[in-house]
Image (cartoon, rainbow, N blue to C red):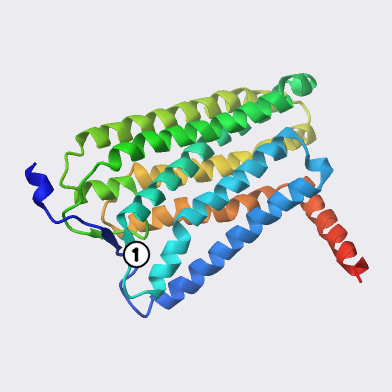
Amino acid sequence: MALRNHSAVTEFILLGLSADPRAQPLLFALFLMMYLQTLLGNLTLLLVIRADSRLHTPMYFFLSHLSSLDLCFSSATVPKLLENLLSQRKTISVQGCLAQVFFVFESGGTEGCLLSVMAYDRYVAICHPLLYGQKITNKLCNGLVWGSWGLGFLDALINILPAMSLDFCKDQSIPHYSCELPSLFPLSCSDVSTNFTILLCSSLLHALVTCVLIVCSYTPIVSTILSISSSSGRSKAFSTCSSHLTAVLLFYGSAFLRYFTPTSGSPLELVFSVLYGVVTPLVNPLIYSLKNNEVRAAVRRTFRKYRQYFRSCP
């Protein structure tokens, strides 16, 4: 009961990337360009996949959901970062902070599941190509995608519900540009041991299971590719999964650097966080378009079709 006597905190101060007022306009311009490129790249990919019937396949169905996730992931944090870079009062309400935590959990957790689903899709395509149409059905694709969204939502929910009951009565400053659950624990005057245990167990379980599924998919993929006798055959087989493998390494590599390295309070922590939360959603559509001939051809066909459409309009 004594804890309830503290003055309640209604907002937090996000210290951001830099306290130097001369650097903030430059950071604003940089992150605005990155955010606009993220929106443009992912929305273009969504448009092209929807408009081009040749991309109505399971792999691109999964990719369209990955682009949707990257839009959610980036939009959960970057707009508030841009606002605070131009504002004197770099604050966020407690409710807004918890909402940001929820959407970051939901987006990140779902993306991890979806990447493991896409790894399974590549496994079937390369190791069992003749059975691909029988194994990867529309019903299975929908079940895997919505199951990924559901698991991400569940992971976010079991972490955010206990956090909503925390009392915040200490220092209001968060040494970060966005709200993350571990950053809130030191600001609480409640007992956070249960919250920390839930966060640790759920995060480790989620990361371990998805990583194991990806490794179990790629182990036979690598074995199958190496068993192909011709170099052109090996190159063609590898090209079908190289974009996904690059996205997996970027996502899990940046997440590992952000959450599993002892960099708390250092500028390196902010660098890893930007890599995980801003750069990854930015480069994913570039990875899948620059390294994929089908997507590049579909982009050209789609823009040619829309250009002809607008020219024919009176």
Q: Is residue 257 above or below residue 279?
A: above
The crowd level at tag 1 (other Cα within 10 Å; few <14, some 14-19, many 20+) is: some
- Of the pair 230 and 216, the residue shown nearer to us: 216
Q: Estimate the x, y position of residue 285 in percent, counting from the top left.
A: 64, 52
Image quarter of the C terminus: bottom right
Instruction: Tell me what residue is drawn at x 32 percent, y 46 percent.
Output: 181
- Name the image quarter holding residue 7: bottom left
Residue at figure coordinates x 62%, y 22% from the top left: 220
List x then y, in percent, for residue 119: 61, 31
Is 51 drawn above or below residue 12 in the view shown?
above
Judging by the rendered image, the residue that carries numbered circle 1 is 16
- Quarter of the rendering occupied by the N terminus: top left
Q: Amino acid at mark 1?
A: Gly
Q: Is residue 293 visible?
A: no
User: Residue at position x 33%, y 38% from top?
Assistant: 161
- Residue 9 visible: yes
Q: Is residue 284 left or right of residue 94?
A: right
- The part of the image, by quadrant, that contains residue 84 is bottom left
Residue toward you, 266 or 56: 56
**Please, which residue is most extreme toward the left here?**
2
Q: Secondary structure at mark 1?
A: loop
Residue 199 location (% of width, % of height): 32, 36
Depth check: give the residue in front, 93 or 193. Answer: 93
